[in-house]
Image (cartoon, helix red, strand yellow):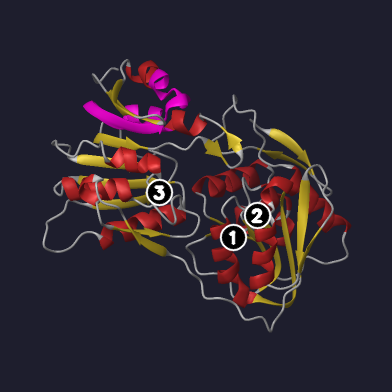
Amino acid sequence: MTDRMTTPSAELQLARFPEDSRDQLRAWDASDEYLLKHLADGDQALDGTVVVVGDRWGALTTALRAHRPVQITDSFLTREATRANLARNGADQDSVRLLTTQDPPVERVDVLLVRVPKSLALLEDQLLRLAPAVHEGTVVIGTGMVKEIHTSTLKLFERIIGPTRTSLAEKKARLIFCTPNAGITRPANPWPHSYTLPEGIGPASGRTVVNHAGVFCAERLDIGTRFFLQHLPYEGGAERVVDLGCGNGVVGTAMALARPRAETLFLDESYQAVTSAEATYWANTDDTVEYGKAEFRVGDGLEGIPDASVDLVLNNPPFHSHQATSDATAWRMFTGARRALRPGGELWVVGNRHLGYHVKLRRLFGNSQLVASDAKFVVLKAVKESAES
């Protein structure tokens, strides 16, 4: 859904990505509006290198395009939304510089604008990576909804950048003002983080997981993935396996260990996640076994994967889009899997019982089989029955 955002300098047409006319969620919120209003009303000039971190759908980057900002994001969808929103508002794509969280950080930051992420770990990692480029004259402002800004958020800014204070709340949004302290002693960056998997979960038992900041299950295996690992189809002849929404890659790695001759494709929209998956895979494979090809790709689900080209898709779909609960991502993942699977190919899904994924799978595939269940989770299987289905 395209909607109009009124800013102090212009009225912008903005949409999320991929654009969906049925989607009623806007591409910005009150925290974006609050920050832009403050910048317009304030006396600090947006001179030098302006860096925007954590922009959700490109609203801030598009609104500040005249200042040629650098955007840093972990999200492929954010990058594509930003490109589309710049074009939608007649901006030159060269007016901004789009970086990912895995790119080398900029060498100098004169204005640092931070949309506070849901993950405190990702905020920590990004502040530590950018801190050497911040100087005493750098303007540092964070923004977020009141429910997203906690004492721990403020302490993180203070520990890494310098003295920190907050604004009054406006429309349930708040600003964070941080004054750089050149003499601060910063901690070492603890990311990426590794841990050992428990026993009793199949081929991945006792193996190493590598997590970059912001990736789900940073400290330990979550119970949903653990349940999935206990019931995956380790036996079988699938030649091409997809770990869709791979996160740290533990599911795809487990399948590669069980079926070493199969090709394994790890897909996620998070750059941090795909980097984690690649590190997890290589930490658990060696030259003594001849493995099939492993591919690691950042993108929007199965977009770009040829029709009828894979045998098995494994999926633990997210049911949140930032702070909003939504089944849109799961629906796109299921639809993409149906298209990409060969006749007879299978989609295996784990999810909370209350999400009712079996209904969606029956609607798409014409079938849904309960593989396993406990008090909280279900593992479901759907089979692509024919080339026409």
Query: What is the magenta range?
Result: 333-360
Tell me the quarter of the image containing the C terminus.
top left
Residue 293 picture location, percent across and down:
21, 52
Q: Is residue 231 left or right of residue 244?
A: left
Which residue has dot 3 on it?
Answer: 247
Q: Amino acid at mark 3?
A: Gly
Q: Residue at x 54, y 65 (%)?
A: 125
Q: Specify the farthest residue to the front.
A: 375
- Name the residue at 39% across, 29% down: 375
Which of pointers 3 and 2 lies earlier in the amino acid sequence?
2
In space, the residues marked 3 and 2 are separated at their CA atoms by 21 Å
Q: Which mark is residue 123?
A: 1
- Mark 2 or mark 1: name the one nearer the start of the chain: 2
In this picture, residue 215 sits left or right of residue 138: left
Please state which amino acid type lies under the numbered disc 2: Val
Query: In the image, what residue type sits under mark 1?
Result: Leu
| Residue 80 percent across, percent down from the top left | 54, 46
Q: Residues within 10 Å of mark 2 (few under 14, many from 20)?
A: many
Q: Which mark is residue 116?
A: 2
- Circles 2 and 1: CB atoms closer than 8 Å: yes
Residue 31 shows in the view: yes
Q: Would you say residue 231 sits in the magenta stretch?
A: no
Label 2, label 1: how far apart the Cα atoms are = 7 Å
Judge the density around disc 1: few (<14), some (14-19), many (≥20) Cα neighbours within 10 Å.
many
